[in-house]
Amino acid sequence: MLVAHRGFRSPMGENRMVDFIQALKICKAVEFDIRLTKDKKIIIFHDHHLRRIGHENITIRKITYHDLCNLEFFQKNKDYLPPLFIEDFIAKISDQYKMINVEVKPDRYSIQEFKQLKTALDILRSTTKAEIVVSSFSVNVLKWITTLDAKNFKKGYLFERPSEIKWDLIKKFDYVHPYVGTVLQKRNQALFAKINLPMNIWTFKENTTVDKVKKLYDSKMIHAYISDNPNLKIEDKESKSWN
């Protein structure tokens, strides 16, 4: 399956409503990041801070959503305003998907904040028939993900390097989400055989990378190709059914 990474991230933008809407013309699967603002708004935004997108030296946790909206960059570039997870994505387009991968960014979430995230995910579940995969790099968040209802949510274990794997934890997950560079190292074939979970691999940019992965792994091991490239060629029956 082809998955739009941050709505097919490009130099023009990422994780914006306009990106998600445009990506829906290509495929019905998306991956994006969520995090909390100072006033506990759940927004779709990748970075911990606003330096790259926003041109301000401030973290998301230290600014309210109202103040974020009023920053000069977002006033001049309204399409770049981080969407609200519930009010924008869920309310407006979530029902159009077949697969939604929600990555919960690492943070020091309180018990109450985890409850808030769970409530938001439940709202998402009520609005869409899509497969919902919840993933994270953070061990604390991964532990929380294991508490989600297996009937409603799939669990994705994100990692970049094999040394990050917690073996007692990963066995509780439905999918493994490895970095494509790690997947391409031949010495790691045994690692993924040991993990023995379908892979949602990130992040593809070139068709040649798809070819290299297919030479190393049986197609049954790969559930999704998370891609910046909207023209990525998957070329298998299952993927075509999802596009």
Image (cartoon, rainbow, N blue to C red):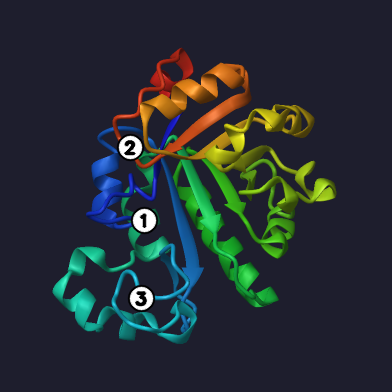
Q: Position of residue 152 (x, y in %)?
A: 62, 44
Query: Can residue 243 be seen at all in this image of the molecule?
Result: no
* Residue where numbered disc 1 is placed: 89
Q: Nearer the viewer, mark 2 or mark 1?
A: 2
The alpha-carbon separation of the residues under discs 2 and 1 comes to 21 Å
The alpha-carbon separation of the residues under discs 3 and 2 comes to 25 Å
Residue 242 image-quadrant placement:
top left
Tag 1, which secondary structure?
helix
Q: Are marks 1 and 3 in contact (CB under 8 Å)?
A: no
Q: Amino acid at mark 2?
A: Asn
Q: Tell me which residue sits at (65%, 38%) in the image.
A: 175
Tag 3, which secondary structure?
loop
Q: Residue furthest left?
A: 76
Q: Image check: 125 left or right of 157?
A: left
Q: Position of residue 157 (x, y in %)?
A: 66, 47
Within 10 angstroms of label 1, few (less than 14), some, or many (20 or more) residues?
some
* Residue where numbered disc 3 is placed: 51
Q: Amino acid at mark 3?
A: Arg
Q: Earlier in the sequence, mark 3 or mark 2?
A: 3
Tag 2, which secondary structure?
loop
* Residue where numbered disc 2 is placed: 229
Within 10 angstroms of label 2, few (less than 14), some, or many (20 or more) residues?
many
Q: Residue furthest top?
A: 237
Q: Image check: 1 left or right of 93?
A: right
Q: Nearer the viewer, residue 12 or 97?
A: 12
Q: Nearer the viewer, residue 169 or 178?
A: 178
Q: Position of residue 199 (x, y in %)?
A: 61, 33
Q: Tell me which residue sits at (47%, 84%) in the image.
A: 38
Query: Can residue 143 be seen at all in this image of the molecule?
Result: yes
